[in-house]
Image (spheres, grey):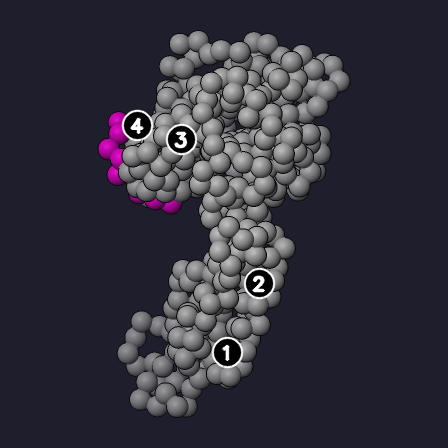
Amino acid sequence: MTLTNRDIVELTAWRRKLHQHPEISNEEQKTASEVVEFIGETKPDRILTKLGGYGVAAVYESGRPGPTVMFRSELDALPIHEISGVLHASLAPGKSHMCGHDGHTAMLGALGRQFGRQRPARGRVVLMFQPAEETGNGAADVVADPRFGEIAPDFAFSLHNLPGVPFGEVRIRTGVVNCASRGMRIVLEGKTAHSSMPETGVSPMLAISELMPSLPKLGSGTFADDEFGMVTITHAAMGEAVFGIAPGYGEVWATLRTRRDERMANLCAAAESLVMKIASRNRLSARFDYHEIFVASVNASDAVEHLQRALDEEGILHAEDGLPMRASEDFGVFGHNASSAMFFLGAGEQHPALHNPDYDFPDDLIPIGSKVFMRTARNILG
């Protein structure tokens, strides 16, 4: 159940290689190929590729009846220019692993090495290298792939490193750990006019100026409340960047966020109703669409118990502080058909925050995270 010193050195080198060659969501072709090559050396019983895009799943069979236990990492990077200054910094301009998915992938690589040497006593282990977590479509696309039914897990586990938490400590709880969210793009259309005669057109200006303060007011409840709802305006634009035309077109982008999926449906309905009312009053047509849809991530009690047992056996401190989080995570999709749980592994109280341009995954977390996963798998499967 332990990694050798050589394993840790090689896994660290592999993580840094992944870091140098980031690919953003839905473009992870080379990263997936790198995973197939690395994990193939551990001789899994089966490797599935192009799951829900560029997803990769490695299966380690015991040959005996038992549950299927899945561990998930993410393949995608972010469209952020890295300024960390590390020697293994991104070689792709404007793209970087500023969320630590390279480190999470290395942890699953560690599991592959160990299960390659000793299969579980019963059931099977699935290592799921998932694409497109950052845009919210990755897990849903993987689950929608017909081949996922062949490896559908009974238990699903994941982790995310978390700056701001003492290094090596864990945050975990039963119930909601990440909010549901979705991006709402609102399009308003009227009629352009010469800027000297704006009265002959229909401008979205007043509607946009009304929507920007009105949409956030749809939020309600405190974050500790299951009825919590939040709307954040992220972008607004209208017309062309010229002086001679009064605009006839505009957009407002907003992120809707709730603790519960059921509350999200109500918040969307309220936002849509508000948009239509304001558009009508201003003689505009309106339409909207949704992007980057994340369901709430909800930890099942039995899955949490397995993780907590592993943490206790490995002597790792854990608490519920800081949970749930407002941020979203698409791992929740796997919990719709499996007992699932995600925990958060401290990257250090002073470590640069996720999505910051100076962030880099702490390599010393690789053996910590992987041993929690390994202990969990062995406790369930033997």
Could you tell me the amino acid type at mark 3?
Gly
Magenta portion: prevailing SS class:
loop
Residue under label 4, please give it: 88
Gap between marks 4 and 1 measured at Cα = 51 Å
In the image, which disc is placed on residue 346?
Answer: 3
* 84 inside magenta stretch: yes
Tags 2 and 4 in contact by the CB under 8 Å rule?
no
Rendering coords of residue 67 (x, y %): 70, 23
Graded by Cα atoms within 10 Å as few (under 14), some (14 to 19) or many (20 or more), the crowding at tag 3 reads: many
In the image, which disc is placed on residue 268?
Answer: 2
Residue occupying the far right of the picture: 65
Rendering coords of residue 320 (x, y %): 49, 36
- Residue drawn at (36%, 30%) of the image: 166
Gap between marks 3 and 4 measured at Cα = 22 Å
In the image, which disc is placed on residue 303?
Answer: none
Dot in front, 3 or 4:
3
